[in-house]
Image (cartoon, grey):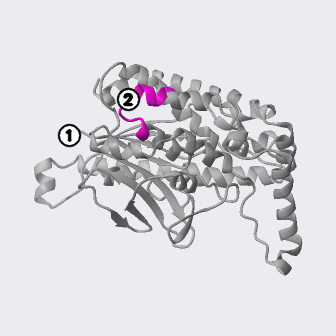
């Protein structure tokens, strides 16, 4: 059993989540041949939710889990995630065009821009979800959660599977629900709005977990984490203001919206946690107990890209299939200003391998901080 529980929090970001694999490759190398799992608590959202589910399934062998994940991400192609054939893309265009022109008459409602059925088939073929329960019973894993956003309730739900004694929770607009994780939870968590279809779980349709996720780190705290490693999918430092003289393309607007969904809440939550830690640090444990403070300091380590991922995506825009390039060119995603949107959809080896290499380099550049966090 774990007494000092370390949690791994993986954020969303579509194809950007390949960066997380590079970080995990470096951690695997630093962890070496030690037994056990360095992260008994795993929390993920969107593509990060898919990654934590993979780690949870193979949590009895952390090095093997990372190697399997790395193999998939290094060899990804977009058609393993969403359909790029002519019937699928042409059908999507026809449905959206028809809805805009005659939807008022026929009440047609297209579900999404892209069909991600290939991703569901991939997850079903490579993940044995029954292994999560076994890992928890055998002590290899304490808890795993995957977050999704309810379109009807507007609440952020952390679907979690955990050891006995971990209780569900409810806070403002967010709650933890105990369940047995499965493919629908991962598909719901990664259902980027407008891009991929929502997924019905029980009585509600859910979309990408990064939407309305006011506190991305919160599930790890509720699941009992004493220290948390957060792997981001974008730079957390603020960039200088730049002039814009041309009207933004649809891709630029969509990329801006996605960055707001995937990146902004993490930075705010980290600031909040830092303030709480600073306040609690002014009191001794005895003083906190006497005052009835139930909060506890949480050690955190954040690893985020040192380079702009959208710039890297722009370098690999031509690795996409020709037909998909044509479709994305129509909304401006093939221009430099549309690279942010592109970075979420570019599931191609040229891009994912660059992100894996960047994640590895960024982690090794902070080697001592990682070693200290892992108590090596």
Q: Please, what is the dominant secondary structure of the magenta stretch?
A: helix
SS under mark 2: loop
Q: Residues within 10 Å of mark 2 (few under 14, many from 20)?
A: some
Residue 238, visible in the rendered structure: no
* Residue matched to label 1: 3
Magenta span of residues: 56-67
Left or right for 106, reference 59: right
Left or right for 253, reference 85: left
The answer to which quarter of the image holds residue 97 is bottom right
The extreme bottom residue here reads: 105
Q: Residue at x 57, y 41 (%)?
A: 125
Q: Establish if 254 lies above or below 225.
A: below
Q: Establish if 240 lies above or below 296.
A: above
Q: In the image, residue 236 lies at what x, y percent?
A: 53, 41
Q: In the image, residue 146 lies at what x, y percent?
A: 46, 52
Report if residue 63 lies within the magenta region: yes
* Residue matched to label 2: 61
Q: Residues within 10 Å of mark 1 (few under 14, many from 20)?
A: few
Q: Residue at x 10, y 50 (%)?
A: 286
């Amino acid at each position: 059993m774990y007494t000092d529980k370390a949690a791994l929090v993986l954020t969303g970001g579509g194809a950007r989540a390949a960066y997380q694999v590079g970080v995990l490759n470096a951690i695997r190398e630093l962890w070496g041949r030690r037994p056990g799992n360095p992260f008994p608590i795993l929390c993920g959202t969107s593509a990060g939710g898919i990654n934590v589910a993979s780690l949870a399934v193979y949590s009895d062998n952390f090095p093997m889990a990372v190697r399997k994940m790395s193999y998939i991400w290094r060899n990804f192609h977009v058609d393993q995630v969403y359909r790029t054939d002519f019937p699928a893309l042409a059908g999507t265009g026809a449905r959206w065009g028809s809805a805009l022109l005659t939807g008022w008459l026929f009440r047609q409602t297209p579900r999404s821009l892209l069909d991600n059925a290939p991703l569901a088939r991939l997850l079903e073929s490579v993940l044995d979800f029954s292994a999560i329960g076994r890992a928890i019973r055998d002590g290899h894993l304490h808890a795993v959660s995957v977050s999704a956003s309810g379109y009807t309730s507007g609440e952020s739900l952390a679907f979690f599977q955990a050891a006995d004694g971990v209780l569900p929770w409810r806070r403002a607009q967010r709650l933890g629900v105990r369940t047995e994780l499965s493919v629908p939870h991962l598909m719901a968590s990664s259902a980027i709005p407008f891009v991929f279809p929502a997924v019905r779980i029980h009585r509600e349709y859910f979309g990408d977990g990064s939407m309305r996720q006011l506190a991305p780190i919160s599930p790890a705290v509720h699941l009992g984490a004493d220290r948390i490693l957060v792997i981001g999918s974008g730079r957390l430092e603020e960039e200088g203001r730049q002039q814009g003289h041309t009207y933004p393309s649809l891709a630029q607007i969509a990329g801006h919206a996605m960055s707001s969904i995937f990146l902004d809440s993490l930075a705010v939550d980290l600031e909040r946690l830092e303030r709480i830690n600073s306040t609690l640090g002014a009191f001794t444990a005895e003083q906190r107990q006497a005052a009835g403070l139930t909060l506890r300091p949480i050690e955190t380590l954040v690893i985020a890209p040192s380079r702009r991922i959208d710039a890297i995506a722009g370098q690999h825009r031509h690795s996409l299939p020709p037909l998909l390039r044509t479709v994305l060119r129509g909304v401006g995603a093939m221009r430099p200003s549309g690279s942010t949107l592109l970075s979420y959809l570019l599931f191609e080896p040229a891009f994912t391998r660059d992100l894996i290499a960047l994640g590895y380099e960024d982690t090794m550049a902070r080697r001592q901080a990682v070693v200290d966090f892992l108590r090596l």
